[in-house]
Image (cartoon, helix red, strand yellow):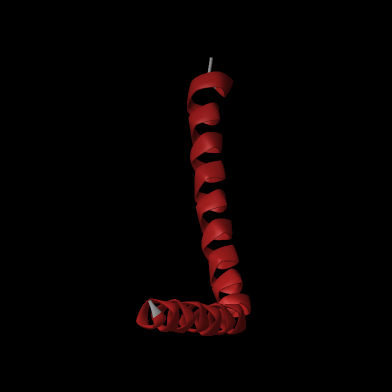
Amino acid sequence: MESVMKSQDYNSHSSISLKRKFKASFPLVREEGAKQLKKIATDVMSRILIHVEKNLLTP
């Protein structure tokens, strides 16, 4: 019973330290994610515009 309690203690402690590490790296992750999202959004918009030009604007 006591060993189970110790392992739960250890698990919660390691999970807290993981969360701290993640929070510390989060601004960097967010910045990279924003760059990738912007790139994807630009790509999607250009594809939509090309599609619109080809199909709707040409008689």
Asked where in the image residue 33 lies, by quadrant, the reply is bottom right
Up-down relation of residue 46 to residue 22 (above or below): above
Q: Residue 56 or 23: which is nearer the viewer? A: 23
User: Residue 19's spot in the image, x, y percent?
Assistant: 55, 77
At 50% from the left and 50% from the top, the residue drawn is 43
Up-down relation of residue 21 to residue 45 (above or below): below
Asked where in the image residue 24 lies, by quadrant, the reply is bottom right
Up-down relation of residue 33 to residue 9 (above or below): above
User: Residue 29's spot in the image, x, y percent?
Assistant: 55, 74
At 61% from the left and 78% from the top, the residue drawn is 23
In the picture, measured across the screen, residue 16 lies left or right of residue 4, that is right
At 50% from the left and 77% from the top, the residue drawn is 12
Q: Residue 10 or 30: which is nearer the viewer? A: 10
Q: Residue 17 or 1: which is nearer the viewer? A: 1
At 44% from the left and 84% from the top, the residue drawn is 10
User: Residue 1's spot in the image, x, y percent?
Assistant: 38, 76
Q: Residue 2 or 25: which is nearer the viewer? A: 2
User: Residue 3's spot in the image, x, y percent?
Assistant: 36, 82
Taking the view exactly as shown, the residue that stands out farthest to the top is 59
